[in-house]
Image (tube, helix red, strand yellow):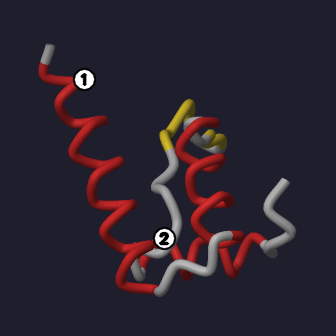
């Protein structure tokens, strides 16, 4: 879907340049589809790394707020 390699995705997650995954089990993870869609739209729009980091931070905050409910 993203065209990125697994190692690139995980490196970008560490740098807050890609949405974080959600652990499903001992050996499986998933991502929230609308978070990935927002990331793709931001990349297509030519957003800077700092803007992408701000997007990822807002996604993380929204996810934490949902978990607190």
1 or 2: mark nearer the eye:
1
Residue at left offset 38%, top offset 61%: 55
Quote the CA–CA distance across marks 1 and 2: 20 Å
Measuring from the top left, give residue 4's x and y in whole percent: 79, 73
Q: Residue furthest left?
A: 68
Image quarter of residue 15: bottom left
| Label annotation for residue 66 | 1
Task: Mark 2: give few (<14), some (14-19) or many (20+) Cα within 10 Å.
Answer: some
Task: Mark 1: give few (<14), some (14-19) or many (20+) Cα within 10 Å.
Answer: few
Q: Is residue 58 left or right of residue 18?
A: left
Q: Residue furthest top?
A: 69
Q: Is residue 44 left or right of residue 1?
A: left
| Label annotation for residue 13 | 2
Picture layout, residue 10 above or below residue 8: above
Measuring from the top left, give residue 56's x and y in whole percent: 38, 61
Label 1 with label 2: CB-CB less than 8 Å: no
Image quarter of residue 25: top right
The C terminus, quarter of image: top left
Residue at left offset 65%, top offset 58%: 41
Q: Nearer the viewer, residue 6 or 66?
A: 66
Residue at left offset 55%, top offset 31%: 24
Secondary element type, mark 2: helix
Picture layout, residue 4 above or below residue 29: below
Secondary element type, mark 1: helix
Measuring from the top left, give residue 36's x and y in whole percent: 62, 49
């Amino acid at each position: 879907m993203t065209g990125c390699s697994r190692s690139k995705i995980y490196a970008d997650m560490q740098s807050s340049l890609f949405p974080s995954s959600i652990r499903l089990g001992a050996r499986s993870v998933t991502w929230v589809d609308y978070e990935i869609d927002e990331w793709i739209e931001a990349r297509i729009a030519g957003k800077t790394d700092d803007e992408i980091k701000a997007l990822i931070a807002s996604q993380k905050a929204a996810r934490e707020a949902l978990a607190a409910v």
